[in-house]
Amino acid sequence: MPTEKIADQTFEEIPIVEEKPVEEKYFTLGKFKLKQKMVWFVGGGLVILLIALLILVNLLKKPSISPGGPQVSTPTPTPFKEEITSPSAYATDSAILKIESELKTIDQDLQSTDLKEAGLNPPVLDMEVELEEQP
């Protein structure tokens, strides 16, 4: 059977630990002593305020339009001269013309061919089926 050990609750034997006071750091400016935490807090606040003011000034600043500024002329497109060149030497070659005509006939045959081939479809099996119950 397990036994429980009762904790001793006498407080006279506990050694007293003396707490060290927290030393605060100071900045000195002449006669003045300033706490370091306060200096950092105020300095950070000033930096954030300065950044917010700069953003606000940039947003509210109106673009200045100078009436006597230089006039910018619109560019005009350069004229394009189309030069008609002679066709390729192969454009009038009899072999090339023959191949082109054969390709046109093959293309016409392909366009007229039925690619679905309805004769290969399975038969429609839409029959009425009635089942009788057997006693």
Image (cartoon, helix red, strand yellow):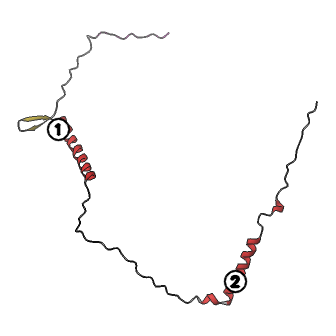
Residue 39's disc number: 1
Q: Please give the name of the residue rendered at 73% of the width and 71% of the height, measured from the top-left corner.
A: 111
Q: Position of residue 54 (x, y in %)?
A: 24, 50
Q: Secondary structure at mark 2?
A: helix
Q: Check the image and report above or below for 105 versus 93.
A: above
- Looking at this rendering, what residue extends furthest in the front direction? 67
- Looking at this rendering, what residue extends furthest in the right direction? 135
Q: Is residue 46 left or right of residue 9?
A: left
Q: Is residue 79 magenta?
A: no
Residue 92's disc number: none
Q: Check the image and report above or below for 114 versus 36.
A: below
Of mark 2 and mark 1, the one earlier in the sequence is: 1
Quadrant of the image occupied by residue 23: top left
Q: Which residue is mark 2?
A: 99
58 or 24, nearer to the observer: 58
Q: Is residue 9 magenta?
A: yes
Q: Position of residue 88 (x, y in %)?
A: 58, 88
Q: Position of residue 130 (x, y in %)?
A: 89, 40
Q: Please give the name of the residue rendered at 85% of the width and 55% of the height, measured from the top-left corner.
A: 123
Which one is closest to the eye, mark 2 or mark 1?
2
68 or 78, nearer to the observer: 68
Q: Please give the name of the residue rendered at 62% of the width and 87% of the height, measured from the top-left corner.
A: 91
Q: Which residues are magenta?
A: 1-10
Disc 2 + disc 1, Cβ < 8 Å: no
- Going by the numbered disc 2, the residue's amino acid type is Ile
Q: Please give the name of the residue rendered at 28% of the width and 11% of the height, measured from the top-left corner.
A: 11
